């Protein structure tokens, strides 16, 4: 290939974003403790009542369905909900609701102690109950606002531990996550890695939320689980290793959460041997058609990052990032229709970079409009831009670590104001098309 795929993830830029979990002051005194306990019980009762009024989203006949109707959505990603203070969770989820977004994708993993993140799973088969406060609260808050969540269970990338952490725990191998992946890919085949992953999935899916009083698998707020965020297996170009792992784990996770949706969480790579276009090729050892067709998988996922994948005029003369992304989206929607599976464009983003077809915010917003219009017109079940952020604890805005940040506020100085409004209008159109 004349354009080698980028060997580092944009998420390496997010390492600095693993901010510490804010703590909530503890009440002192018997009377205050008793009052707090009563308030917590009342809150859990309200959570159960609210949940009883909501239905689970289902998948049937190539569509997502809710209460007997087609369900389509405009949504976003905000990976950090599982680590942050209630104030920060409130800020971003309130903004999402104000925009009319209905589905948020956020991480449900933080593996390994000794890192900058607060570990949910410090060691294999060990879980930090106190560290779950943020994730519990995020699910509770999302439910209050009528939002739904998509929760991946592990990361392909080393941010928040990920597959590298599992391999390190059990095999002690040097990291090659960004090379050919031989060590990284042992995650998919090593018996101990698989055992620990299954135990983690069982723990998270079956845990009781301290704020709602509901097990996660009983809460319709959790619309879907994902096996992983962006799983890749470069050491096996055939796709068989990743497919075998996904087949095994999708069946297992579906058995734990039969009323909730399940997706693989992959990027949509087609796995075609000899194809000149990296995302259509077999370079990453992933075959989207086969992964999406798995019996336990309810919908296919697609990520859209032409700049990261060398699909720009600077890398390939005659290629345009916006047009390429539109074709990538429509190809997957057409193929999903043939599979009779819904398709969600669950991550997409562009950086303002004149050398990579996006000279300014207006050009980026025009691309976002083209992509969301393509999703709407061609039957996507939903789309989720990367990424919505909001205020942090000191009242300032979350830093733009990777150049994809979108903020919802009316300050004329907000450089993403037009994009946020575009996504708000699109979310309304998707809802109206349901």
Image (tube, rainbow, N blue to C red):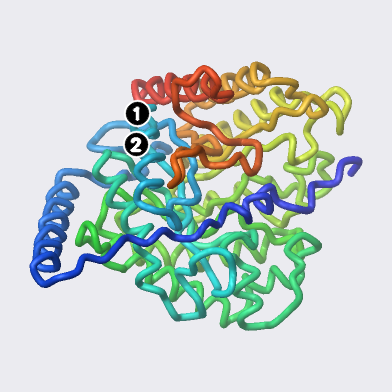
Left or right, residue 142 beside residue 224: left
Q: Are marks 1 and 2 in contact (CB under 8 Å)?
A: yes
Pointer 1 residue: 98
The residue carrying mark 2 is: 94
Give the image location of residue 23, x and y in percent.
37, 62
Q: For the C terminus, give its image quadrant.
A: top left
Is residue 376 among what the camera can see? Answer: no
Q: Nearer the viewer, residue 110 or 90?
A: 90
How crowded pointer 1 is (Cα within 10 Å; few <14, some 14-19, many 20+) is rated as: few
User: Residue, x 23% and y 37% (percent of image)?
Assistant: 67
**Residue 347 occupies which quadrant of the picture?**
top right
Q: Which mark is residue 144?
A: none
In the figure, 200 relative to 222: above or below? Answer: below
Residue 263 sits above or below residue 93 on the image: below
Q: Is residue 358 above or below residue 120?
A: above
Q: Quadrant of residue 42 in the image? A: bottom left
Q: Is residue 431 left or right of residue 413?
A: left
Q: Residue at x 72, y 57 (%)?
A: 285
């Amino acid at each position: 290939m004349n354009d080698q795929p980028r060997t580092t993830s944009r998420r390496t830029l997010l390492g600095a974003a693993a901010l510490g979990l804010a703590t909530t002051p503890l009440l002192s005194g018997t009377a205050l403790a008793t009052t707090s306990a009563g308030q917590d019980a009342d809150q859990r009762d309200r959570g159960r009542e609210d949940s009883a009024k909501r239905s689970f989203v289902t998948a049937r006949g190539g569509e997502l369905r809710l209460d007997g109707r087609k369900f389509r959505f405009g949504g976003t990603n905000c990976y950090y909900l599982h680590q942050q203070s209630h104030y920060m969770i409130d800020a971003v989820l309130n903004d999402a609701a104000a925009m009319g977004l209905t589905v948020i994708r956020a991480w449900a993993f933080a593996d390994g102690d000794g890192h900058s993140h607060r570990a949910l799973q410090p060691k294999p088969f060990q879980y930090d109950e106190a560290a779950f406060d943020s994730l519990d609260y995020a699910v509770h808050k999302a439910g209050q606002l009528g939002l739904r969540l998509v929760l991946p269970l592990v990361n392909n990338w080393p941010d928040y531990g990920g597959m590298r952490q599992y391999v390190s725990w059990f095999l002690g191998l040097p990291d090659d996550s960004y090379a050919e992946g031989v060590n990284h890919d042992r995650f998919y085949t090593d018996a101990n890695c698989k055992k620990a992953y299954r135990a983690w999935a069982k723990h998270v899916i079956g845990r009781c939320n301290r704020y709602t009083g509901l097990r996660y698998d009983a809460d319709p707020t959790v619309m879907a689980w994902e096996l992983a965020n962006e799983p890749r297996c470069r050491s096996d170009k055939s796709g068989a290793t990743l497919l075998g792992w996904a087949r095994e784990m999708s069946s297992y996770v579906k058995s734990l959460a039969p009323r909730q949706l399940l997706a693989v969480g992959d990027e949509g790579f087609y796995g075609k041997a000899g194809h000149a276009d990296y995302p259509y090729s077999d370079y990453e050892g992933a075959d989207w058609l086969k992964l999406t067709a798995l019996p336990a998988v309810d919908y296919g996922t697609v990520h859209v990052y032409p700049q990261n994948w060398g699909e720009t005029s600077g890398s390939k003369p005659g290629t345009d990032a916006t047009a390429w992304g539109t074709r990538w989206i429509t190809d997957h929607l057409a193929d999903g229709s043939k599979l009779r599976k819904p398709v969600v464009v669950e991550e997409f983003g562009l950086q303002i970079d004149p050398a990579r077809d996006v000279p300014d915010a207006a050009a980026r917003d025009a691309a976002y409009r083209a992509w969301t219009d393509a999703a709407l017109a061609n039957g996507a079940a939903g789309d989720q831009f990367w990424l919505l952020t909001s205020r942090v604890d000191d009242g300032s805005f979350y830093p733009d670590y990777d150049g994809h940040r979108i903020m919802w506020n009316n300050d004329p100085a907000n450089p993403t104001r037009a994009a946020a409004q575009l996504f708000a209008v699109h979310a309304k159109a998707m809802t109206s098309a349901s």
